[in-house]
Image (tube, rainbow, N blue to C red):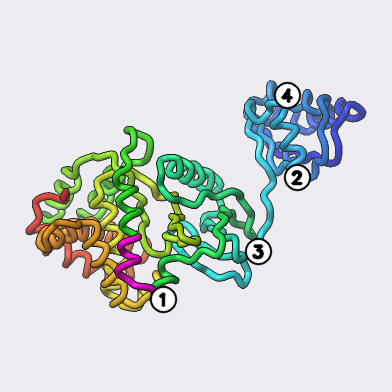
């Protein structure tokens, strides 16, 4: 049941307010939501009403508090005793520049200083708070990341707000003619920082566990021998605690002044760096294999530039390794990438037979000559 509070609750009306609430709920609810959107003030007498409600109905939460009311709850320790949330500032992104889009959200520039990531899922508040915590964790560990400072409501959706003063994505910088090789080098510097960050077991989700589920899903769509070997290869990838970004590409790297920062931290995980390389292969080349214009729509650059950027990134990431080693590492990453793409296409767009057929063809060729996915 939801109860709506309005105006002021103090010693002059607290008793009547409590009586009204009890009359409404009687004994008919195990969960109580108190909507404080129109509550202007609550005194200690009102707080005692809330406390008694919480004791009688343990699953009581308060939503949509304005800043003043939330501060009262916070100062008196109520935010430590129960679930209390602020009202979210409303924001429009009509006419705003889209500077990035991923599976979970769209990133808009709302003014020269600010960007907002709007989540596609209308029930995304838990995701948003999770990403904020992941961004803070990465920041503390020395990863150059932008930390969201506010949550806003955008129509029926929610978004995270970042302060990025006149920042431009690497995608934008490439489109403006900046040197591909130099930007790839800067990109790899951040990537190596991420991958050299080791976490404790259980701190972040395991990419291996997720990827094994991809292999299990696509196995029935492959020739029996290939499907069996594919799953074996996935199961044998070493379980490591290297931090992974999970969606590392030029639209998620921003330059602000002389500093490069990462955004879109909701895909952080741990695992072998081959998983990161597989996602990068898809972003720069794999998605556009059957549709060359895909990379232009997704990253804002042509496929030739995307190929050059990917190859430059490999050169700096595998510095000191010979061409054959790099080729084999990419082929291992391609196996993971095609497995992920095959699963996604079968689930989301089974009518796209060209993508499905290409993934199956590539997997049959690569899996038959590969004995390990680790490098």
Mark 2 burial class by Cα count in 10 Å: few <14, some 14-19, many 20+: some
| Range shown magenta | 175-186
Frontmost residue, 232 versus 190 = 190
User: Which residue corresponds to mark 4?
Assistant: 51
User: Hey, which residue is sitting farthest front in the picture?
Assistant: 258
Q: Nearer the viewer, mark 2 or mark 3?
A: 3
Q: Nearer the viewer, mark 3 or mark 4?
A: 3
Element on which disc 3 rests = loop
Residue at position x 49%, y 59% in the image? 105
Mark 3 burial class by Cα count in 10 Å: few <14, some 14-19, many 20+: few
Does residue 266 appear to the left or right of 58 in the view shown? left
Element on which disc 4 rests = helix
Q: Which of the two discs, 3 and 4, labels the residue nearer the N terminus? A: 4
Q: CA distance from mark 3 to mark 4?
A: 37 Å
User: Which residue corresponds to mark 2?
Assistant: 37
Q: Quadrant of residue 328?
A: bottom left
Q: Which of the two discs, 2 and 1, labels the residue nearer the N terminus? A: 2
């Amino acid at each position: 049941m939801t109860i709506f509070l309005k105006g002021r609750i103090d010693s002059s009306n607290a008793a009547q307010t409590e009586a009204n609430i009890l009359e409404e709920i009687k004994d008919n609810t195990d969960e109580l939501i108190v909507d404080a959107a129109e509550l202007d003030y609550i005194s200690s007498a009102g707080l005692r009403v809330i406390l008694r409600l919480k004791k009688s109905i343990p699953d009581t939460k308060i939503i949509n508090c304005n800043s003043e009311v939330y501060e009262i709850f916070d100062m008196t320790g109520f935010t430590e005793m129960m679930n209390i949330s602020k009202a979210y500032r409303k924001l429009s992104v009509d006419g705003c520049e889209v500077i990035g889009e991923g599976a979970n959200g769209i990133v808009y520039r709302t003014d020269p200083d600010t960007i907002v990531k709007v989540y596609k899922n209308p029930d995304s508040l838990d995701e948003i708070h999770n990403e904020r915590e992941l961004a803070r964790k990465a920041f503390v560990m020395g990863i150059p990341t932008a930390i969201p400072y506010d949550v806003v409501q955008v129509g029926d959706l929610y978004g995270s707000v970042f302060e990025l003063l006149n920042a431009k994505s690497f995608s934008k910088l490439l489109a403006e003619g900046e040197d591909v090789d130099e930007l790839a080098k800067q990109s790899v510097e951040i990537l190596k920082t991420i991958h050299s960050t080791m976490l404790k077991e259980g701190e972040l989700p395991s990419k291996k566990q997720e990827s094994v589920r991809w292999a299990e899903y696509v196995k029935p769509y492959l020739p029996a021998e290939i499907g069996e070997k594919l799953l074996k290869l996935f199961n044998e990838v070493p379980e490591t605690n290297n931090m992974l970004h999970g969606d590392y590409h030029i639209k998620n790297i921003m330059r602000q002044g002389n500093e490069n920062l990462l955004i879109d931290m909701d895909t952080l995980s741990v695992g072998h760096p081959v998983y990161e390389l597989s996602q990068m292969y898809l972003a720069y080349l794999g998605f556009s294999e059957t549709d060359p214009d895909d990379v232009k729509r997704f990253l804002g650059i042509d496929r030739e530039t995307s190929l050059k950027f990917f190859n430059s990134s490999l050169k700096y990431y595998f510095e000191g390794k010979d061409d054959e080693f790099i080729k084999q590492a990419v082929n291992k990453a391609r196996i993971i990438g095609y497995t992920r793409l095959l699963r996604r296409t079968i689930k989301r767009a089974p009518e796209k037979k060209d993508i499905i057929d290409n993934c199956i063809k590539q997997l049959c060729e690569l899996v038959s000559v590969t004995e390990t996915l680790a490098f």
